[in-house]
Image (cartoon, grey):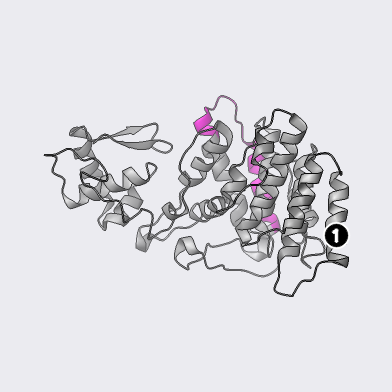
Amino acid sequence: MYQDPFKEYIKQSEPNKRDKGYAWSTAIGLQAVDGLKPSEHLVKTAIENIEGYITMEDAEKQINSYYETTAKITEADRTEEADKVSVRIASILSEKAFTFSPSEYIGIHKKLFWGIYNHAGKIRDVNITKKEWVLDGETVLYGNAAVLRQTLAYDFEQEKKFSYKGLSQDEIIAHLALFIARLWQIHIFGEGNTRTTAVFFIKYLRSLGYDATNDIFAENSWYFRNALVRANYTNLKKNIHETTVYLEKFLRNLLLGETNELKNRHLHIHALFDENVGVNDKNVGVNVGVKLNQTQSKIVKCMKNSPYSTIGEMAEYAGVETRTIERNIKILKEKGLIDRVGADKNGHWIVKI
């Protein structure tokens, strides 16, 4: 698990150090979405910047100089990429300037990856697939290379037209989750899409008035990516439906300070729930004398381990039709064993036994 060396800085009351700590923490944590880990030299450089010994420009120069004159790397070593992209993310997050536009989005990619990828700041011209762990090796259907620019422009246009006026926080978060999921699904770049999308999204959230300066991205960047994947994958044959519920949990922690459990295993299409936690007296606390059929036991198990479970996910887990799940949920509610809090789309389950 990622160990954040900047957590104490984020907790500080001194705004300058707190903001820098957040920027570096997020920048380094985001490298995990591509399986990268920055060097100790980068961490030391970051701390020098936070303490005020060097500027952000000095930090970037130090990292560039380090790889030009000191560090010995192999072709397979991507530590240089992790270090250079980290300092660039920290720099962007430290800037106040922001424009909500496709050009800004593409510009962020160019700034993050120039000198690293030949296609930095360029829209891909080939279709791509990626095997995803969370999908058991399947891929999301990414945007068609022939119309990427038009698709990107359309998504930005629709978001610009959208009004948040009068919406509850639940409704705002649901919409934000949908917007960022659709933006990421386009996948307009050959590589670096998730890191670019995360940086752009943080800047956009700030422009909407959200602080978004805690350690959620740093500690849960892999969850963020898997949540984006689940928001863009449907397989009707396997009764799997795209859902933004995981993204919404992430955003509620980020924007509202909630403490929803963010576990990657909950997102896996075939291992959404911990098989070691059963429905019995010891593990779940079922009252003596309460008799549940097999389907009801699995429903309770799902709700206990993942309160944001959907009807489709429970049906998939139990191996039954959704109408069977709905019928048994009704029975469990009538018995007072479970309850639903919140709206159908954004609410969660409570197991009362």
**Residue interval drawn in magenta:** 149-172
Residue furthest to the bottom: 75
| Residue at position x 64%, y 36% in the image | 212
Residue 84 placement: quadrant: bottom right
Percent coordinates x, y for residue 57 in the rendering? 87, 48
**Is residue 205 on the magenta stretch?**
no
Percent coordinates x, y for residue 342 in the rendering? 39, 31
Near-viewer residue (300 or 98) = 300
**Side of 307 relative to 111 (left or right):** left
Residue beneath label 1, please? 64
**Side of 96 relative to 347 (left or right):** right
Residue 61 placement: quadrant: bottom right
Percent coordinates x, y for residue 300 in the rendering? 26, 44
Q: Main secondary structure of the magenta part?
A: helix
Near-viewer residue (52 or 285) = 52
| Residue at position x 51%, y 38% in the image | 174
Which image quarter is the N terminus in?
bottom right
Near-viewer residue (110 or 52) = 52
> Label 1 neighbourhood size at 10 Å, few (<14), some (14-19), many (20+)?
some
Q: Is residue 139 visible?
A: yes
